[in-house]
Amino acid sequence: MLPRMQLRIGVDGGGSKTRASLFSGKTRLGLGRAGPSNPLAVGTETAGSNLMRAVQQALDEARERMGKDWEEPSSLPCGLGLAGVGAGEEGRQAAQALAGLLRGRFPNLRPQFYTDLEAAFAGTFEGRPGILVIGGTGSSALGFDGASQLLRVGGFGKRLGDPGSGFAVLLEAAQLLLSKSEGLLPGGMPSWGPALLHALGCADPRDLIPIFARDPSPLELEQGIRALEEAASGGEAVPGELLRKAGRILADHAGALGARLGLSEVRVACAGGFLCKAPMVLDSFCARLEGHSREQQRSYVFLDRSPDPEWGAAGLAVGAWPSLRLEDRAQSETL
């Protein structure tokens, strides 16, 4: 259990935004927002600037809310769940650099770094066994047996492929559109093609090439996926199958982890706008999960619950769930 009045900060940072929350017990005293903080995507300087901005906003809001009752803590635990810090030695070095920046700005801060997936998992299951499947721009899953096994699948990134992700679906749709419009595949321009091109601001199929050369922006990704969803809802077979296939692939992430964890009953939660907010994807996910229950003779129980990664990161920073032994990626003799 968390000490009721112990102040701590939890940060959730990714490729599009950063949120920081200051907690006392389970009460959120302050909230800060800023731009992206994946250091491998935007660089350490930009990531650090956005982290400091979000943390400062959370502290300022808490001070204003508490008024004369506010007491500046001499030591403030801060858990940061960031995309990018789990990427081998480069990610570890980025976490160490960010820790130095944060300590320079906030001398009383005790930053500890985890992946965004770990923070979301902790905020969902609070040390209990389960599987969290992420289906957003990227895809990955984390499973815990409640004792010693903490296993991960996926999270390969765009270049190696994040199967079942929103990016992977939009990429495959763009590949099909280009190949059909140029005669590499039969059928000519697909009927759903013009709507997708319009959603991405393209006048011609070949306008897709520079978009994917630099990677679609979060807004382009959202608009492209929405165009595919609308086409599928209107009866277009190909977009519908792309979305349903993504749901099946994401459920296979859970199935792979469930088999390795060896639990007879597995609670499964999901996160990420693509999986959680696209009905066709989520329905396919749940149907495939039921199939894994029958095939593996294992009960998969789907939890309709939204993760709170800031709560998870804050709890990890104060050791709220000892069974979840996660490494602080900023640990270094120099810190």
Image: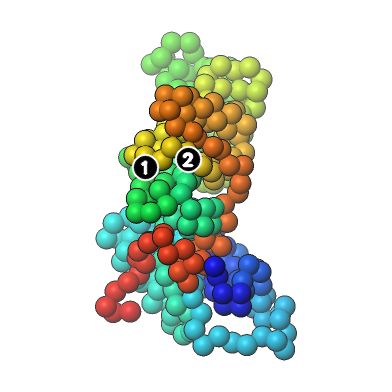
Q: Is residue 187 visible?
A: yes
Q: Position of residue 9 (x, y in %)?
A: 54, 71
Using the image, determine if residue 200 lies above or below residue 97: above
Instruction: Name the mark on residue 219.
Output: none
| Mark 1 Cα-neighbour bin, 10 Å: few <14, some 14–19, many ≥20 | many
Q: Between residues 208 and 327, which one lies in front from this camera angle? A: 327
**Left or right: where 186 falls relative to 12:** left
Instruction: Name the mark on residue 266.
Output: 2
Q: Between residues 269 and 93, which one lies in front from this camera angle? A: 269
Q: Is residue 257 visible?
A: no
Residue beneath label 1, please?
261
Q: Quadrant of the N terminus?
A: bottom right
Q: Position of residue 237 (x, y in %)?
A: 56, 16
Whether tag 1 and tag 2 are in contact, CB under 8 A, the answer is yes
Colour mapping = rainbow
Going from N to C along the chain, the mark reached first, 1 or 2, is 1
Q: What whole-number distance in Å separates the C-alpha atoms at marks 1 and 2?
A: 9 Å
Q: Secondary structure at mark 1?
A: helix
On the image, which quarter does residue 273 sit in?
A: top right
Using the image, determine if residue 85 lies above or below residue 225: below
